[in-house]
Amino acid sequence: MKFLYAHWRVDYIDAPKDPKSYNPFLEILNNPDEKKSLLLFRTPLSFVILNKYPYNAGHLLALPCREIQGLHQLTAEEHTDFFQTVVRAERILKEALNPDGINIGINLGAAAGAGIPRHLHCHLVPRWTGDTNFMPIIADTKTLPVALEHLWENLRKFI
């Protein structure tokens, strides 16, 4: 058997899992080290981060600053800001990474796949034609061609 080490996932494995007491997104907002927390940019009401556990290189998360669970809880001002933030993140991905497409989606509730259902977040996953290969099928492994810190530095140039 061969092993592919993904040492960076240990933070996820070791992190508290009780959704009632732990919200890593609020920790990111309070961390002054934007690079370490992978915070790409923020507005007064929302922010965008690189997903620390990405589906694909450049996977971003857009979030309102306020911890809420659903779109219906956004104020009118938050709604406008949040979706403008998603559009801005889309533009950054297109300019910086030139993907062939982008999956954009929101999972509301644990049953819908939300890993952290207590804080609304929108996934932006850049896609390239042929970006899938045999690794996920035969090895249950996803390969990412670039380190998160390097990707963060590149994306920041397009803010």
Image: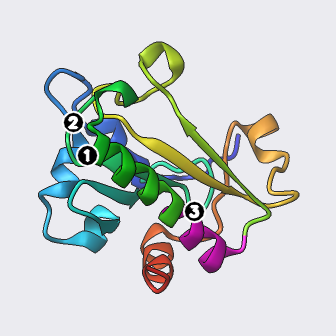
User: Residue 102, which numbered label?
Assistant: none
Please name which of the two marks, 3 or 1, marks the residue nearer to the observer: 3
Does the CB distance between marks 2 and 1 fall below 8 Å?
yes
- What amino acid is at disc 1? Phe
Query: Residue 11: where, in percent of width, then height?
Result: 31, 47
| Label 1 secondary element | helix
Where residue 110 sits, quadrant-wise, is: top left
Residue 108 or 26: which is nearer the viewer? 108
| Residue topped by disc 1 | 25
Residue 91 or 110: which is nearer the viewer? 91
Sequence-first disc among 3 and 2: 2
| Label 3 secondary element | helix
Q: CA distance from mark 3 to mark 2?
A: 22 Å
10 Å crowding of disc 3: few (<14), some (14-19), many (20+): some
- In this orientation, does residue 50 appear? no
- In this orientation, does residue 132 appear? yes
Q: Main secondary structure of the magenta part?
A: helix
